[in-house]
Amino acid sequence: MRLALRLGAYFGTLLAGLLCAALWAAFESGAAVQRRDLDARLLAALETLSNCVSTPGSDPERACLPGVHTLVSMTDSQAFMKALLVDEDLRVLVHSDFLRGDVSARGMIANDPYVATVANRRDPFFIQAQSATGQTITVYASPARAAATDSRAGSERVGTWIAVFRSESLDRAVRGAHDALRWRLVQMGALGTGVGLLFSVGLAVYLVRPLNALMAASRQVASGDFSGRVPEDRGDELGRLAGEFNQMAARLGQLDEMKETFMAQITHDLRAPLSSIVGYTELVVKGYKGPVSPDQAAALETVIKCGRSLAELVNNILDVTQLEAKRMPLNPEPVELAGAVESVLNVLQVRAQEYGVNLDTYLLPELAEVYADPQALARVLTNLVNNALKFTPSGGQVTVKAYRGARNEAVLAVSDTGIGIPKERLPTIFAKFSQVPETKNKVRPVHGTGLGLTICKQLVEGMGGRIWVESEYQKGTTFCFTLPERGAQPSPSLATP
């Protein structure tokens, strides 16, 4: 999973967890809070009702019944049982039955057990009790006061307001409100989680974007291109990291340029003396300064052989340097494919016979011509076939094939039945000075610079093609490269700088 998605998932999960925990805590405490709130509202309504008899000499029924109606409407009809105002002797002054015209309770003694318990208490309160039928009920009580006839005496108590509700119905009403709360919390949780996830992904993308730019620039540097830079548009640690990376890339580019200049200069300076040493030694062997003994001739041949190896290394280094700097001219033109392959194999056939390796070709007849630099094509084929012969044991097979690949593209493949290349070595096989210790000298003594495949890659890409390798250790190797067919539009990489 990409880092942005992982960070988004982590942040989103954390936010969702915190949100769900907060909502769950609110939900768990909601029922108790809602019940307490309901009790407080009913008790407050009863206290308000107590003020209806505050005017001396007023008719309690006329003054209080509207308030009783309000109290009744505050809950479910199944929850409300009755409301009454009793005096100190528990005689009924006002009853909720009066609202429907039933005045039979007027002046009667309220004989319910809980009435005597709650009457004449000084402060508003409520209790749980049992009705005559065994139901659990909630009884709310509040003193009713009226102004005294003597204004200096303050107010005098005229009785107690009592409201009775079925506890089960009140609880059911609270549960309904609780269920509604739960649904609202679920909606809030879903919305909050969605918003949190979007915010988390946005934050993660914001944090990871400079890392992606840094990663892309790092890949450029790893591939040898030191021109990559990272935007320094942030003032945090990532911005400072981008600045440090840019300084590092610039310094590496300078060092690489110094190295290339040095390599080009030193190899160019070594080429002429080495050619002179080899040429002069060959003349000495031929008796230029007088006859030489067989032992002297053998020693001089060793000098010539070492000089040629060193000259080959110098030439290869110079070629790689020029190819990387795009200073080696390539002149693509239509090339007759069969003739180019045959000329290379004719030269290497002697070596194949010496090694006891069968060298064969299979070229698709339709592939008459390709668009390539003749010398570069010959060099690539020579290098690949020569490598195949080196690592193929006696009795093995090396085959050069040509077939059509993608549109307007020819594929040339050099296959062998040799020792193969370990899988872990394949990614670096085209790197400069890359060699495979597991296969070196396993078939026959091999002398090389580790630059041949690097040169092949540079030449093939310079001609607008691609090159790759397929290999299985101990079973063989196939090097493939592509070239444009004649008539195909030349690649921009073919242009000579």
Image: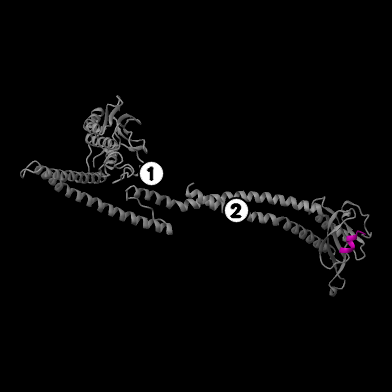
Which mark identifies residue 424? 1
Q: Is residue 57 left or right of residue 464?
A: right
> For the magenta stretch, what is the residue range?
111-118
Which disc, if any, is residue 17? 2
Q: Please give the name of the residue rendered at 38% of the width and 53% of the height, measured from the top-left corner.
A: 231
Q: Can you tell which mark lies on residue 69?
A: none
Q: Residue placed at 56% from the left, 50% from the top?
A: 195
> Which SS class for mark 2?
helix
Say which element carries label 1: helix
- Judge whether 348 appears above or below 142 on screen: above
Residue 193 relative to residue 257: left or right: right
* Residue 148 in the image, given as x and y percentages of width and height: 86, 70
Q: Does any portion of residue 199 appear in the rendered image?
A: no
Q: Main secondary structure of the magenta part?
A: helix
Residue 484 in magenta?
no
Q: Amino acid at mark 2?
A: Gly
Q: Position of residue 290 (x, y in %)?
A: 5, 44
